[in-house]
Image: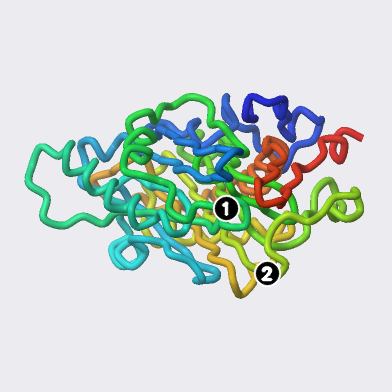
Amino acid sequence: MAGDGRGRTLRLRETGRAVGRMAPGPLNAVTDVPGLLVGQTTLDDDERGVYSGVTALVPVALEEARAVPAGFHMVNGYGKFVGATQLMELAELETPVLLTSTLSAFRAADALVGWVLDRSATPVTSLNPVVGEINDSWLSAERRPVTEAHVRAALDGADAGPVAMGNTGGGTGACALGFKAGIGSASRVVPLEGGPATVGVLVQANMDGDLRVAGRTVLPGELGLERAGYTSPRGSCVVVVALDVPCTGRQLERIAARGVLALGRVGAAYSHGSGDYGLAFSTRVAEAPVVLSPADLNLVFTAVLDSVEEAVVDALLAARTVRTPGGRTAHALPHAVLLD
């Protein structure tokens, strides 16, 4: 169940609404994709005003394989996506994926390298750690709160169970579309020609724009709430897509692009000060690349678009209101907006 244990336990589907026609997986989360684990470390300290953390996505195939097929897409590059150039050049993912806060990204990357080296049975002379980030400084007073121990806890604690959403992991200090946001996740079972496949997404939602949900625009001011986030357009959003089909790097790049473009459905502004990134990878490694047919690729595109839209809404519904010691308030989206 989405939520942070403080009464925010509503998901979009529980309001009687659904996005698209495809059915979700059992958990309606990225962990529905076989061979993928998720772990999170949350730093939520109201006294110190620290709201940050780290989210880890761990493909099990990396225990045996050097890399899994991957694709990367950037809509706006105002961000610090560690490892992006090699992802684009080789279309391969060599490590788990970490999501954290801006100035913690580099410490997280170093911790990730250490974690992989400790687990490697053979000497490693080159490694491309992959870390995405969002700027949570509007809420979080400490700029580099994430330590190596926090990163290792997320990696070591990763499992295939339900994904906690809202104020958790790398989304603890996130605001999106004028409200408190955070981590969101969803999945779809896709009827491909060769049999059903699973597409799952995890979104670190922290973007500017005006929320569009349930067929209308929802503004904080219309609900009597102050808008959360910087007054000048800035923020970032990272969308991670996983699927259990070993398709080509070029097709995964196109799939990753749909993940970022889907943010427009819920009102993302893609502003100058935002880093908007998509990463897609397969949890399966094939001896020869599998090329999806145009019909199958269209179905995967649709699954990604629908899953991302639902994941962002679930992130907003799961998030709780945060009031910092410095006087800032990030209001959660009132559930009544979708229950009325």
Q: Secondary structure at mark 1?
A: helix
Q: Are marks 2 and 1 in contact (CB under 8 Å)?
A: no
Question: Is residue 176 shown left or right of residue 186?
Answer: right
Q: Secondary structure at mark 2?
A: loop
Q: Work out whether 329 lies above or below 64.
A: below
N-terminal of the pair, mark 2 or mark 1, is: 2
Q: Residue furthest bottom?
A: 272
Quadrant of residue 211 within the rendered picture: bottom right
Q: Which is in the foreground here, disc 2 or disc 1?
A: 2
Question: Is residue 210 shown left or right of residue 156?
Answer: right
Measured in 3D between alpha carbons, the distance from the residue under mark 2 to the one under mark 1, in whole angstroms, is: 28 Å
Query: Circle 2: is it few (<14), some (14-19), or many (20+) Cα within 10 Å?
Result: some
Q: Residue at x 41, y 62 (%)?
A: 81
Residue holding disc 2? 233
Q: Amino acid at mark 2?
A: Pro
Residue holding disc 1? 301
